[in-house]
């Protein structure tokens, strides 16, 4: 496949959320039922966000969160099935890693269900020490003198 015309983009303003949802419904069982509003919030809070385009067609997406120095996590890496196996996924992850918010971070994490070998070829290693997860539920606490419940640990204005 000739990929010289494929375009990588880090501008969130170019994301077509209808195409994004379709891409995930087709390619990512773990994210198929996410809503437009949840996608918008997740993307707004992610830096960098990388999209891959074949003309006006969204064919790839990935995002990360990072403190810029110590830790970062890569999320939601997906390439349309018709474009897999030609190096676009690898280039997309490398583009994330070379972004100024990521390129000096000492440790980058990611979670994957079936693609361990793909990430190992990029340089990721299996990590047996990071195994904890919290299925978060908002804990609301009533504080004296506050009419609305406040999320525990957050000061009200």
Image (spheres, rainbow, N blue to C red):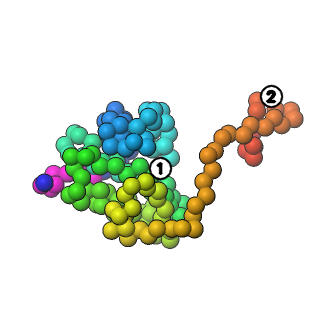
Quadrant hosting residue 26: top left
Contact (Cβ within 8 Å) of mark 1 with mark 2:
no
Vertical side of 156 occupied by 6: above or below: below
Q: Residue at x 68, y 39 (%)?
A: 138
Pick the front one: 139 or 65: 139
Q: In this view, does 118 lie above or below 139?
A: below
Q: Answer whether residue 25 is visible to the viewer in this image.
A: yes
**Observer-nearest of 90 and 69:** 90
Q: Is the magenta stretch mostly helix, strand or loop?
A: loop
**Residue at the image position 22 percent from the left and 39 percent from the top:** 56
Identify the residue under disc 2: 147
Badge 2 marks a residue whose secondary structure is loop
- Give how far across and how far down residue 131 sits, in percent: 58, 61
Q: Indicate whether residue 3 is drawn in magenta.
A: yes
Q: Which callout, 1 or 2, points at the residue further toward the start of the chain?
A: 1
Rendered residue at 40%/37% (across/down): 32
Question: Looking at the rendered structure, which numbered label has been put on residue 46?
Answer: 1
Residue 81 spot, x, y in % from top left: 25, 46
- Identify the magenta region: 2-8
x 54%, y 67%: residue: 128
């Amino acid at each position: 496949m000739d990929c010289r015309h494929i375009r990588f983009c880090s501008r969130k303003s170019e994301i077509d959320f209808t195409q994004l949802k379709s891409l995930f419904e087709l390619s990512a069982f773990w994210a198929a039922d996410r809503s437009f509003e949840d996608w918008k919030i997740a993307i707004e809070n992610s830096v960098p966000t990388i999209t891959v385009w074949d003309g006006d067609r969204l064919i790839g997406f990935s995002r990360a969160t990072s403190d810029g120095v110590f830790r970062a996590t890569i999320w939601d890496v997906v390439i349309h099935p018709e474009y897999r196996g030609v190096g676009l996924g690898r280039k997309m992850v490398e583009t994330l890693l070379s972004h100024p918010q990521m390129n000096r971070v000492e440790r980058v994490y990611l979670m994957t269900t079936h693609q361990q070998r793909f990430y190992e070829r990029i340089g990721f290693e299996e990590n047996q020490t990071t195994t904890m997860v919290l299925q978060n539920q908002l804990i609301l606490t009533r504080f004296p003198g506050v009419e609305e419940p406040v999320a525990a640990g957050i000061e009200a204005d």
